[in-house]
Amino acid sequence: MEKSKPVSLKFLANHLKLSPTTISLVLNNSPRASSIPKTTKDRVLKAARTLNYRPNFYARYLSNKRSFTVAVMVPEISEGYGASVLAAIESRLAREGYLHFVASHRWSAELIEETPRLLMERGIEGFILVNMPLEHGLPVPVVNIGGRKKLLGVVNMLLDNRRAGWLALEHLAELGHERIAIFKGHPGSADTEDRWKGIHQAAARLGLTIHPELTVQLQRRPFPSAPPIPEEGYMYAQKLLGRNQRFSALFAFNDISAIGAMSAFRDAGLRVPEDVSIIGFDDIQAAAFMNPPLTTVRQPLHHMGDLAAKTLLRRIKEEDTVPEDILVQPELVVRESTCSPSRETRHPRPQPASGREISAH
């Protein structure tokens, strides 16, 4: 049987007795389509579905000099920060009729330099970068989530990490905690130093002491190319307990390490939160379903992804000049992994773990 030819725009126009321009405006959801009656729009959309009309991408590109395609570059895709931000970006781009490529650079200097060039050769109109150390601007609009470097044509979107440190320590101080352990972020993380400064500023204002013996820096290898895993938090919680230092709470750099620490404390015979309170960071989906549900500092990940996509599309459409960098505010989400320390709370010598072996590699 001879394969049927694709339905053309001209055929669809003749079928509906409408101009090709009208049909194109409706199918492309153009702002100019706002003057077209809803009944006409419905007719066009129904006929396009019934006749299986597909716009000719190359014709559209040649006539508009537009690809309606953007790229999203992330370090890696795993449960947590990156996946939540990406989901919101994808939803917004789909609603606006844009295609997108997703590329993982895994912190490779070669990929960070070469991938944008390869994507631009394919007609990319703009980039959303997630925690990517961009060293120079690009000839297309860019929104860099977690970016800090001031570059021409690049809008950085930053979480107020200093506010985040304040929220966590203020909550623990109000509960009565004084000796607070801290998981400091990885040396290669862009957020580590900002959040660490915020923690110190908050501690000074609250009259708390940051004890070096209660601070553990996450350094699992091969960071930063590998995604965070709970085993990392488990291992560093064991290391913390092995110092035999008294503490009644832990503020973890992210929810993933907090979840691992929770398991390590439990295996050592400690109860959460009765013996040790735990605060995470990010508010990933799993946080609310832990036992007990995890108190955490929420990054509005969905909002950040959606706002990044909207900002990029506005810039592509040249609806405004390059906006100022965007500062996003965190929020404390109190669940059941924190409570006031009892007078009897003293960390005993850790009990042997239940046969569990954790490797950092």
Image (cartoon, rainbow, N blue to C red):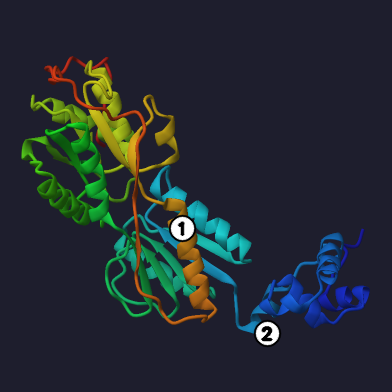
- Say which of 347 and 89 sits in front: 347
Q: Amino acid at mark 2?
A: Ser
Residue 111 rendering spot, x and y as whole percentages: 36, 63
The single residue placed furthest to the front in the displayed view is 174
Q: Is label 1 in a helix, a strand or a loop?
A: helix
Residue 49 rendering spot, x and y as whole percentages: 82, 61
Q: Amino acid at mark 1?
A: Gly
The answer to whether 198 is drawn above or below residue 4 in the figure is: above
The circle drawn on residue 63 is 2
| Residue located 57% across and 63% down the image | 93
The answer to whether 142 is drawn above or below residue 280 in the figure is: below
Q: Which residue is mark 1?
A: 305
Q: Residues within 10 Å of mark 2 (few under 14, many from 20)?
A: few
Residue 251 rendering spot, x and y as whole percentages: 23, 38
Name which of mark 2 and mark 1 comes first in the sequence: 2
Q: Mark 2, mark 1: which one is toward the viewer?
A: 1
| Residue located 41% across and 79% down the image | 322
